[in-house]
Image (tube, coloured by chain):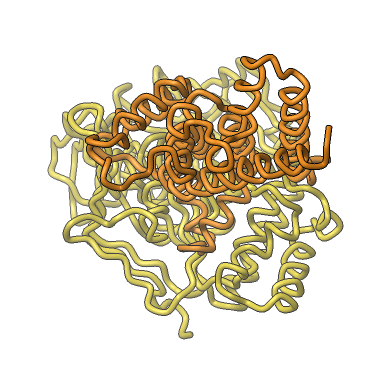
Chain colours: A yellow, B orange
Amino acid sequence: MSDGAPLLAARDLEVAFGRGPDGFRLRVDELELRAGQALAVLGPNGAGKSTLLRTLAGLLPPGPRGAVRSPGRDVALVFQRPVLLAGNVAYNAELPLWARGVPRAERRRRARVALEEFGIGALARRSAQTLSGGEGRRLALARAFVTEPDVLLLDEPFDDLDDPGREALSLDLRRAIDERGIAVAMVTHDLRQALLLADRIAVLRAGRLVQVGARDEVLRSPADPGVARLVGMTNLLAAEVTQADGGRLRLRLANGRVLSAAGRAAPGAPVWVGVRPENVRLEPARGDLASSDERAEVVRLVSDGVVATAWLAWDGVELRTHLVAGRGLGQALKPGAPVAISIRAEDVHVMPRGQNASEK
Amino acid sequence: MSPLVWVGVAEVALRTLAVSASALLLALALGLPLGFLLGRHRFPGRGLLAAVANAGMGLPPVVVGLVVYLVLRRGGPLGSLELLLTPPGMVIAQVLIALPLVVGITLAAVGALPPDWHLQARALGLRGPRALWVLAREIRLGLLAAVIVALGGIISEVGAVQMVGGNLEGQTRMLTTGILMYTQMGRFEDALALAAVLMGMTFVLAGTLTAIQQARRA
């Protein structure tokens, strides 16, 4: 299997539930899941993420002109709330093999391997109904892995798992992706895990794919403020283009401050400026600042023990930045402290700003 | 009681078993697929059918007897089949009593599964007979409840079999109709003998089914 070859290709999907204003419609022109790659599907609640996975799994009709092709491939889907069948853990794990007519001895062997892999080998004889949330999740994942699927679709796979469990799952998935060249698509609200694992990101909103691309590209250049917020680009500022010159832009923010950026836009055009919090650089304010442009004040400081998030007031504009907690500035800064900020032009992402309410 | 009387009791008991078992099997053969269909799929008329099944669970047997009598009597729509006053006629009446019970309970058991249960079963690769098998396993408590309730409903039923069968000695006498008759004749010893057999049968059957139902609950 050559790397990057599409294992599953969908086009012209159109899945509708209900009618009128209460109805929901998923429309996807094109989406491919490629060998050796993981796709993270991000999107707000009700965007159609689960519906998309179910359609890709062939469980929902793809619509009048739609098609999902995965010739000769085994496609497995783990639901957000997996059904565990009445019976013991081993019975549940063997079920997909039994459904495919695999002989009993082979079923047992492969189920045992899958259960061991997810750390619940010792629970094989336990009734599946007595498992904890995390154990049940592991069983559902083992049950999906047991057929060694070529395409693995995961709906919120990290739910109910503790931190070591999440990490183990990430590693298992990465290994299956790298060693066996499987294709993975997962829906998750856990941005950290999604980014750890994903090679590509697809953003779904109101049933439409808003952006699909390589992970870093989407992280750096989200299509609009909604996508920006989903991928953690939390500094979103309204601005206006004052100068445009050969791919260089001068932008004036609402507070009158000026930023440079790379990009193309017409002078006078309203834009959104997005800056990832880790790209707002801080220094302790010195008295000899050439201009007051960089002067800001720490408003609030919150630390989770690893990362400290500082909210800054920058002349009427609020900015967020990330620091290493308990070290350097992350330790020294206190609310009310004056700081100097700098934002490099290459870290400023410019998005069109229209009248569209869904943008922000 | 003389051995001769016990032979008579055994004959009535066997007929009761045969008629009720036939009716039960027929009711299950018709009712399980119908209940599954109503519990699983959405189609026009489904609500009406489900309501009919649920209402039918409380159907008075004597009304069933009356209707079957009217249909099977000479000159009735199916009079030419000459099923009135025969065991097959009684089977028809009992099927009509048991069918709504089987449909209603199966429908409720299937409907109690999570909404995406069938989708998940398909996602696991389950199709056709294997999917049905896993489903049956999943709702087996409900299915056994349907069997127990349907059996209880028909084996102890008296009104319909009396009207349709006529309690003819050696032909259509059942344990229940026999009890009724002996009581009216004042032959309480005979009535009690039949009653004891009926109770024994019911206990053994219900007990066996309950044992199966509860087998793996611990």
**Residue A319 position within the rendered picture, expressed as x and y whole percent measured from the top left:** 47, 28
Q: Nearer the viewer, residue B194 or A152?
A: B194
Residue B129 visible to an observer of this rendering? yes
- Pick the front one: A58 or A27: A58
Q: Is residue A293 left or right of residue A311?
A: left
| Residue A34 figure quarter | bottom left
Determine the residue positioned at 26% across, 48% down: A15
Outermost residue toward the right in this view: A122
For this view, does B95 lie left or right of residue A30? Answer: right
**Quadrant that contains the C terminus of chain B:** top right
**Where residue B77 appears, x then y in whole percent?**
22, 38
Residue situated furthest bottom in the rendering? A1
Q: In this rendered view, identify the residue nearer to me: A107 or A241.
A: A107
Q: Is residue A250 visible?
A: no
Q: Is residue A245 above or below residue B194?
A: below
Residue A308 point in image, percent of width and height: 66, 32
B49 to the left or right of B111: left
Residue at coordinates 25% horizontally, 43% vertically from top-left? A16
Residue at left 45%, top 43%?
A: B86
Is A94 located above or below residue B79 in the figure? Answer: below
| Quadrant location, the N terminus of chain B | top right
Q: Residue at x 50, y 23 (%)?
A: B159
Which quadrant holds residue B19?
A: top right
The correct choice, above or below, for A104 with respect to A89 in the image is below
Answer left or right for A53 relative to B177. left
How many circles with numbers are drawn on the protein?
A: 0
Q: Position of residue B75 (x, y in %)?
A: 22, 35
